[in-house]
Image (spheres, coloured by chain):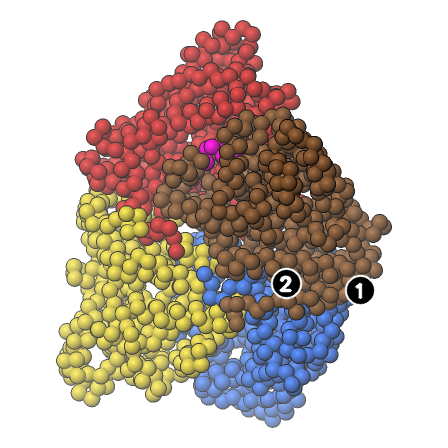
Chain colours: A red, B yellow, C blue, D brown
């Protein structure tokens, strides 16, 4: 019946794809419709109007693209840049690495600024590069907001500040795949030009929708960008936005209805409450990690991620074993260590539609798994530490008071 | 959108209705069908053939009735007894009490044997009654297998043994609503005559199907039983069983497909493994209760229930507050104390489609709630105690090894 | 995968169970919940408030019972009558017959007034019985509003009028299983005392909810009615209504959410529009029948049913073959002829969530089936006749103008 | 509740997106899962093994890409060609036009061979081009198998034959978006190099999966193709195919389970039976069109499409009005005329999970709509003509005999 059935609920704690709310599953449970009707037009309009709220932009133009985060990256790059353009790109983990590989494949001149995995983007180097770039050869700064490999969140306000200080016109293009909806993001206030996210992270939808929001400056840049592009071309959308038909090609109406339900839930909870919930779950996770005597892969507290925590295991333990044991004994899905940190870290995603008891169940599972693989953890220690914090901070559910 | 929306998953730990597996939700996600087709006939036949396996009977006749447990009780009684018949009925909690009230309403002459709530059925008294009943005036023994109010499981083999010893022909009619599918039940081996359960407990379906299985002796008794009955009359079914049409009236085809999927999952996991899982979750719960310094409402270890644990709170605490706080702060649904134990116990249902990390999340929630209401629990203590046991006993998931 | 898979959509035209709207299927696609929460209380209250609107009563008390129509019948009878009570009951088809059999089983003194199948209830005989019943021995008049076997709708205003004329206090108990929601029903205006319907007819839900509405006079009668009853006892409900907990036992929360969605759709379409749609589909069906040269089983135009049309086949044809051929060649589910009209009629249910093109697809299927079984129908004739009427009468869909 | 609610089922007869079987909707009704588990690997492998069967290839390599048909086109082109490459491309309708626009955007040297809309691809011109292309400058022939705008199916065997005759090594790249699964396609036998389809057509899934199958020769070509590509790069897949992880980025697991269910249904019906069903529905549609006195946009019988019929309306009628009236009065979704044939044709899609009575309902709706807009059709004429053919040709449903 299933390819690997296990009793009870699967505990999904990879940092995406995340748990879909029942409301969204319900909203998507439907037959196809003709996408060329006033109904879908009205639905689309409501989505374009509302999606920007979680990017905190009023000037940005959103594109809902039937693709994954990888495709959304490509859309951000090819619409704003021309082959050969110099871009500064920060390598701080596997996802920034993959993005950089894409940037190279697409023939940009990528100036890679690497940090140790677990560190944030090295903005000192950015400063020196900006200082010496009198001709404004640098066309864009590409940076991940939250590096999902290491659980490191970069401070984007500093990037803006540097560009402003040096009056540098480079675009800021941000991979916010694992942050939008989970970590405060203020596109307008921070002066970000292109932001990329996707549906299966904090938005808690199935995979399949890449979301790109472009500032007016980015839209302007797209007019002269010479990268070849067809499927990902913003112009296709912009032309249809003008006519009110919205779609250059057939969208998944299930995903549209799903996004509508997902946004409704976010607004019902209160978007700021959603962000606080993510902070709370992240802090609780870190307290458990500390209680277990393990280290956070992220080196500085100010960069701790509200979406995912990467946990370093002792050298005698293979983190891959933790992940596979969690799955085949506890029906618990954890994130593996990737590339440089393969075998060295495992990850707990605490992003998306999730509450505290779900997390505590996960932490209990991690404790047992740690013991299974030979790490001498005191069972209950992490859960206890996390609970002590949560018990004091979880607010009552407003609709139930 | 919802009447009381809370973020994340609802943690459902009442002892019914229980968590429905995604597979079953999917199977039920369908339009109506004409129930008078060979397709539904074949589906029904497969259900009647398989449902008896979880009652461990080959001689029993099953009835799948569009009703609740209360209706199934009525079906068991009115088909086998006549008004005025003397029956011995054990009162050990709220559900046995409600059943006894029904028995009285239906004009049986009910000989109530009461125990303190938390104790099991007093079989010594039964023995004395049987001993003195030379005329076989007692027509039936009515007993709950598992009293959901107090988490007490009666030993039915002893009832059989007493009847055999006294060569007494009384029927044994069992409310197994919260035990079938969770606690070992051997209808044929134990010589039980009528067994009643319902869909929303260990079968992990929505409410709406009462299931009654009748032994050949019970079927025989139904021929002379004079209680008026129409909707619940077994003859309606038996007549249709003979023709192969099966249904005297329109069944819910969604429930039929749901039951099919639910049984498939039980067999995929292995029914004995399902029973072991329930025992494991129950034991883990009791270890947590012990670690919290609280008492089990069930007085004797041999009667501990694998479906539900009722936990006694200290006199200064109102268990109702625990239940309402768990719901409005942690999105956790616990069982309240009922009637005599209202305010004094709360209940953790560990029955149905549930795994260990779900339970540990619940236990973590209970700990925080206890602290919220002023009980000085050490956070993590219960989870730790439960985990220590579980980590040693949870088997690998066969399909994932 | 399925027990009898056929490509494309199943065309469901039995007079119940009917087609469930996607909205309702979606609303029911959910896990269980604890039914003892303010959320379910609020949901239930909204249902009790709204369900009476489609019965057109403000004084009636509704009961939503986890049962089928057969159980709802029993609830109507046992709560208002005592064994031995004389009731007048009209036999005009299979469903009135089954109800009468139930009445007898429940030990009422049933005064059966039989008509030929295809005729309406013989109210002349009722008049003579009332005229001669000076002692008011007749306690109730039991009548089907719409006999689903023959497609005959009785005029209930005449029953009221007769009782009024003879100042007779008998209760009027109505089986409106296949009429409520499809055919105008004015409980208060017509002075009906108990009305019975169920979820899988015009309400377009799965089977599993019997709905009974009781007038104040019926509630009063229930206080002295001596029929034994437990599961179906209104007092169980009334007691819980007072406390605001509503449920004497566990309801199916899926059915509650489904009913909420179903009522929302009815109100969105406009209830009077729903009734007009049913009239329109019924008339179109009859025009097709006429074009085919076949006869309506219902003998008088004033009794034509808006829910179902029973069609008489020529003597050389077995209507059962039509039904089985429709199903195994065209994936079309039609209603068989029952009992006295078995083999002689087949039925087209045009009740519930259905629109005109669905019906025309069905009519096209019936035409081909008629030809398959040897009846010389002109293909397209029935569809053409129905279309001519429909094209002139279908209103624009308000939300799409 | 909905943006444009209409009672009853929506009759979806655009040539994509098509009707999703309930089985597939059910299979997709699920939470996310970690895509990096053996379960998803096994599921993916089963899909890659089975999807090629409906392309009738054993040597082709399939790619399941989270995109639409437009993206799949781009994947086919950029993986096999280099900027500046000369390609011959046939313009016979809106979709071939859009593809040609894409080809130009991607900087290929496109040699457009145009036909009147309603005609098939002009292969005589292809022959002359091949004859004169001694240097093999032509790198690829791009052709739609079925032009969805006009309902014209090209004969691909002739393209192969011409290339063979002239021993020309150009690749054949085929847009089979609206044909795969509906119209016989023999990738290996016909020597096709790249085939493109998408999920929301004959596969009857939601939009969101583009499917590309590449011949060994195409895979070889991809090694030297110099078009920039990242998201659509086959190498990403091929690298992961080797490791058995399959996915270079996160797939929609809902779509994977949906595809699994969809393929299971196709195989249960029998793939050849699926193709016959499409032929039958297409022929029935054309008979209705003829009965209405209207013309097929497709000019030659040998090119009639089994997926879609484009119908030419008289000059005094605007086909757009037909489409909008069908939707706002009959809840019927028809395809509009596009570009050159806007206002002149409307389209009936008879592709995907659909049976005969669904089509006849649609045809009845079209008849009424035609009358609504002033075209003097005899109601029932088209349905009658179609029925006469269908009644003789529809086979019994094997599982129901």
Q: Residue D378 — which label?
A: 1
Residue B356 in sight in this render: no
**Is D233 part of what is drawn in magenta?**
yes
Q: In the rendered structure, the residue with mark 2 lies on which chain?
A: D
Counting from the top left corner in percent of width and height, residue D286 is at 72, 58
Q: Is residue A173 left or right of residue D300?
A: left
Q: Residue, x 40% and y 64% (percent of image)?
A: B260
Q: Residue, x 35% and y 86% (percent of image)?
A: B223
Q: Is mark 2 on a helix, strand or loop?
A: helix
Counting from the top left corner in percent of width and height, residue D341 is at 77, 44
Q: Which of marks 2 and 1 is in front?
A: 2
Mark 1: give few (<14), some (14-19) or many (20+) Cα within 10 Å: some
Counting from the top left corner in percent of width and height, residue D182 is at 60, 53
User: In the displayed structure, would residue B74 be above or below residue B293?
Assistant: below
Give the residues in magenta: D231-237
- Choose between D362 and C296: the one closer to the eye: D362
Q: In this view, does A246 lie to the left or right of D36?
A: right
Counting from the top left corner in percent of width and height, residue B253 is at 47, 66
Q: Which residue lies furthest to the right in this view?
A: D316
Sequence-earlier tag: 2 or 1? 2
- Choose between A239 and B6: the one closer to the eye: A239
**Is C77 part of what is drawn in magenta?**
no
User: In the displayed structure, would residue D319 be above or below residue C328?
Assistant: above
Residue D226 in sight in this render: yes
Residue annotated with mark 2 = D356
Quarter holding residue A249: top right
Mark 2: give few (<14), some (14-19) or many (20+) Cα within 10 Å: many
User: In the displayed structure, would residue D181 be above or below residue A269?
Assistant: below
Q: Residue, x 23% and y 53% (percent of image)?
A: B280
Marks 2 and 1, how far apart at CA:
21 Å
Q: Residue, x 43% and y 25% (percent of image)?
A: A96
Q: In this view, does D62 lie to the left or right of B358?
A: right
């Amino acid at each position: 019946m299933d390819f690997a059935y296990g009793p009870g609920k699967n505990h999904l704690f990879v940092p995406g794809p995340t748990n879909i709310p029942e409301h969204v599953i319900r909203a998507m449970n439907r037959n196809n419709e003709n996408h060329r009707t006033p109904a879908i037009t009205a639905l689309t309009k409501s989505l374009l109007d509302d999606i920007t709220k979680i990017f905190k932009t009023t000037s940005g133009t959103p594109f809902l693209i039937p693709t994954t985060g990888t495709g959304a990256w490509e859309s951000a790059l090819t619409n704003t840049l021309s082959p050969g353009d110099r871009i500064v790109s920060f390598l701080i983990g596997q996802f920034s690495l993959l993005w950089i590989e894409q940037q190279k494949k697409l023939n940009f001149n990528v100036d890679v600024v690497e940090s140790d995995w677990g560190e944030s983007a090295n903005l000192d180097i950015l400063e020196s590069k900006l200082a010496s770039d009198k001709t404004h050869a640098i066309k864009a700064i590409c940076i991940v907001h939250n590096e999902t490999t290491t659980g490191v969140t970069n401070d984007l306000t500093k990037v803006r500040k540097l560009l402003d200080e040096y009056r540098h016109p480079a675009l800021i293009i941000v991979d916010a795949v694992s942050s939008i909806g989970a970590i405060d993001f203020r596109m307008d206030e921070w002066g970000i030009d292109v932001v990329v996210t996707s549906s299966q992270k904090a938005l808690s939808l199935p995979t399949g929708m890449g979301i790109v929001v472009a500032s007016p400056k980015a839209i302007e840049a797209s007019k002269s960008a010479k990268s070849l592009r067809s499927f990902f071309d913003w112009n296709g959308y912009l032309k249809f936005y003008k006519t009110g038909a919205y779609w250059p090609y057939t969208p998944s109406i299930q995903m549209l209805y799903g996004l509508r339900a997902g946004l409704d839930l976010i607004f019902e909870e209160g978007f700021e409450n959603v962000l606080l919930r993510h902070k709370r779950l992240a802090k609780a996770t870190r307290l458990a990690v500390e209680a277990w005597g393990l280290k956070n892969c992220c080196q500085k507290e100010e960069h701790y991620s509200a979406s995912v925590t990467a946990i370093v295991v002792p050298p005698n333990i293979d983190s891959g074993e933790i992940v596979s044991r969690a799955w085949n004994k506890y029906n618990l899905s954890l994130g593996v260590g990737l590339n440089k940190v393969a075998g060295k870290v495992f990850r707990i995603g605490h992003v998306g539609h999730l509450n505290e008891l779900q997390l505590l169940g996960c932490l209990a599972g991690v404790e047992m798994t740690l013991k299974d693989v030979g790490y001498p953890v005191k069972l209950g220690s992490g859960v206890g530490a996390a609970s002590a914090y949560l018990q004091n901070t979880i607010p009552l559910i407003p609709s139930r008071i």
